[in-house]
Amino acid sequence: MAELSELLSRVDRLLDRLEHLIPTPPPEPDWRAPAFYWRAGNQGGYLQAVHQPHHIPLQALQNVDQQKDRVLRNTAQFAAGKPANNLLLTGARGTGKSTLIKSCWHYHRDSIRLVEIDKPDLPQLGQLLLSLAERPERFIVFCDDLSFEEGEHHYKALKSALDGSICAPGENILFYATSNRRHLLPHKMSENLETQQVDGDIRPGDSIEEKTSLSERFGLWLSFYPFRQDEYLAAARYWVESLGGHWSEDTRMAALRWSMTRGSRSGRVAWQFARDFIGGAGVDE
């Protein structure tokens, strides 16, 4: 009996060690949630429900009316079950690219789910798209700050998923992305030397063609530009007044001084100024 007890004890210890080696199955997503975040893991990823996603009203986005109209229309087409394009927003920092995507999606959150994936997790994009394609809901897969450095190969998974794989993306999925870099991949001056002239036409080299082919897979491509001073002040005034403050000449001068300390004029800088200005009122007295 002692030998049997010892044997059973050793079996129990072995099973305990094996439990740590066997991967835990990913949790089933709560499909009632309006948004999700893709959590990557060594044995695959899973969708984490986001029940209260971040939201800024569309009217808070200043000086991007044309971009706002295009993103709203494309998202409305997708929500209505009509053809729509994958979307890439590029340009200056802090001008509202990612906020615009989330605000336009929020307009249609009853008919579209938002799924955010980080750039380092793009190798698992195929797994994510397969899991979403089987669902009856419609999804926007969103990646913020999408740009790649020399030697990074995550972009190949995205390139294949957007257009080029034998397995086409589901009709219920669009891909929205933002980037500060126009072509997503760095261009070197030396690559211009590959350009050739053929029968009077300028033909870029293979390196440039490879790097521009990713951004060209986005059917809708919109640019954002740095704010002029009057545009920055208009955004600062909106945020000051929306936070319950009063806009005056002193406030205007304070907003200008704030932008000079940041070395930038953008919607984000205007929002940060308003929070500091309104939040600090009376604190230092």
Image (cartoon, grey):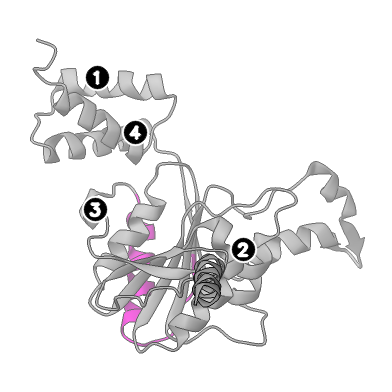
Q: Which residues are magenta?
A: 64-87
Marks 3 and 4, the one that precedes in the sequence: 3
Amino acid, disc 1: Ala
Image x and y of residue 139, in percent = 39, 77
Query: In terms of secondary structure, where does tag 1 sit?
Result: helix
- Residue at 15% across, 27% down: 279
Amino acid, disc 4: Val
Q: Say the numbered circle drawn on residue 254.
A: 1
Q: Give the alpha-carbon distance from disc 1 to disc 4, as whole Å.
A: 12 Å
Residue 65 colored in magenta in the image: yes
Q: Nearer the viewer, residue 215 or 141?
A: 141
Query: In terms of secondary structure, where does tag 4 sit?
Result: helix
Marks 1 and 2, the one that precedes in the sequence: 2
Image x and y of residue 145, in percent = 50, 51
Marks 2 and 4, the one that precedes in the sequence: 2
Q: Say the numbered circle drawn on residue 34.
A: none
Instruction: Check the image and report above or below for 14 versus 151.
Output: below
Marks 2 and 3, the one that precedes in the sequence: 3
Instruction: Check the image and report above or below for 65 versus 190.
Output: below
Q: Main secondary structure of the magenta part?
A: helix
Quadrant of image for the C terminus = top left
Q: Give the alpha-carbon distance from disc 3 to disc 1, as whole Å.
A: 24 Å
Q: Which residue is mark 4?
A: 269
Q: Say the numbered circle drawn on residue 215.
A: 2
- Residue at 29% across, 32% down: 272
Q: Which residue is mark 3?
A: 56
Q: Give the alpha-carbon distance from disc 2 to disc 4, as whole Å.
A: 28 Å
> Given this view, does label 1 or label 4 mark the residue nearer the observer?
4
Q: Residues within 10 Å of mark 2 (few under 14, many from 20)?
A: some
